Amino acid sequence: MTEPSKVIHVRNVGHEISENDLLQLFQPFGVITKLVMLRAKNQALLQMQDVPSAINALQYYTDVQPTIRGRNVYVQFSSHQELTTMDQNTQGRGEEPNRILLITIHHMQYPITVDVLHQVFSPHGFVEKMVTFQKSAGFQALIQYQSRQSAVQARTSLQGRNIYDGCCQLDIQFSNLDELQVNYNNDSSRDFTNPNLPSEQKARSSQPSYGDAGMYALKATGVRACAGFKVGYPQMPNAAAIAAAFGGGLPPGISGTNDRCTILVSNLNPDRIDEDKLFNLFSLYGNIVRIKLLRNKPDHALVQMGDGFQAELAVHFLKGAMLFGKRLEVNFSKHPNITQGADTHEYMHSNLNRFNRNAAKNYRYCCSPTKMIHLSTLPQVITEDEIVSLVEEHGTVVNTKLFEMNGKKQALVLFETEEEATEALVCKHATSLAGSIVRISFSQLQSIRENQ
């Protein structure tokens, strides 16, 4: 056992957890004097006013599992007896208000430039300087305001918010720097007080390359990120990688420049459809923000996707698909987004969204419904008969194959029709099988061979 200390070590602190969340967890036990977020390690160090306060907190959380935003966090005494200035400087930031902010962008699916950040942060005060760079913690930026009050206001208003809907989450700390040094005015750094700085002959961007959007006619259209800030960005993130996933270019009929995020789905079977089944189908093509079944038109629904490109994929691949005996009509809605309300289902923060990680990689699996489904994240001990039992109520199973890839069990199931496969997917994706949450997508294979 670590010797009791007034410093508490907290583990499994996800990016969605803020300093205020941690403060609320420990404030009932006494005064908190210091807090250091170790974002790169998903940890935090928190110092109570005295050792008895820390002991009370840890004794309480020995019997009660501490949970923040649905995530279990784990607490223990730190090996530190006191948090020093050095401990805080190790992270390059502290809690002392400063006019310079250190920004870390989590779940970054779109390119973030100085211009994007300026549009987000300038409403809170005059931004003097800005520098962006890549660190082990992710994409980061330093933003210098003219006044400390503006920096405090920006941090209070923007901490934990997303620049774009469902991604590019802002994690904002006060920097320990006194002044930013900016040498160039370009996409990765800017001195707004000195517009005469050179742009640098060949600006080396410190952020990851997002490909040449011009190669695929994906021009910066100033489109509106769905339910997010109004900022301009190339419509499709990581354009070259996504186009490569489709074999070097976008599928025929996909422009990559659509900015409408909400889809109207009609001719549904109202007796069998619900929001979760629609989520299971449309999440094949992008992240889902929210879904609304129209009560005055029971065979209609609105689906809001994460961005216009994902909405365009869904409309393209699902138009005319058969589901529950009905041929779906899938079109862009006149509504820019779905207003949150009692009759909407929220999916923005669902961990079942498929494009939260490796978004570009997931585009390669986008296709119209096929007769074959692919099942993954299966239990390690599973038989083909159990796979058939899971899905056979939805149609005639022609063939199955259970196999292992990278040490993980997966399966292919071939149905007689695309409609049967689609029904199995919408009904059984994200269901539990022997303690595992099954993930289902369409396979583009035409048949199952014994040596596959």
Image (cartoon, grey):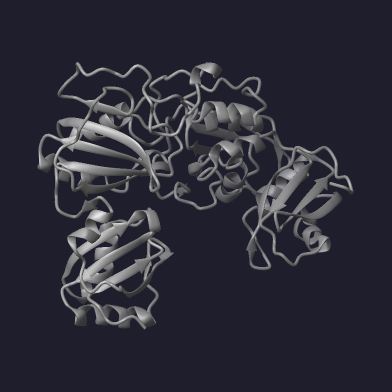
Is any part of residue 235 visible from this angle? yes
Residue placed at 25% from the left, 82% from the top?
A: 56
In percent of width and height, residue 161 lies at: 32, 45
Camera-side residue of 272 and 170: 170
- Residue 228 in the image: above or below residue 136: above
Residue placed at 52% from the left, 38% from the top?
A: 303
- Residue 129 in the image: above or below residue 287: above
Residue placed at 37% from the left, 81% from the top?
A: 62
Q: Is residue 83 left or right of residue 2?
A: left
Q: Farthest residue to the right: give it.
A: 450
In percent of width and height, residue 40 lies at: 38, 54
User: Which of the 4 quarters of the picture holds residue 134?
Assistant: top left
In percent of width and height, residue 69 lies at: 38, 60
The quadrant the N terminus occupies is bottom left
Is any part of residue 324 visible from this angle? no
- Residue 414 in the image: above or below residue 226: below
Q: Is residue 125 left or right of residue 245?
A: left
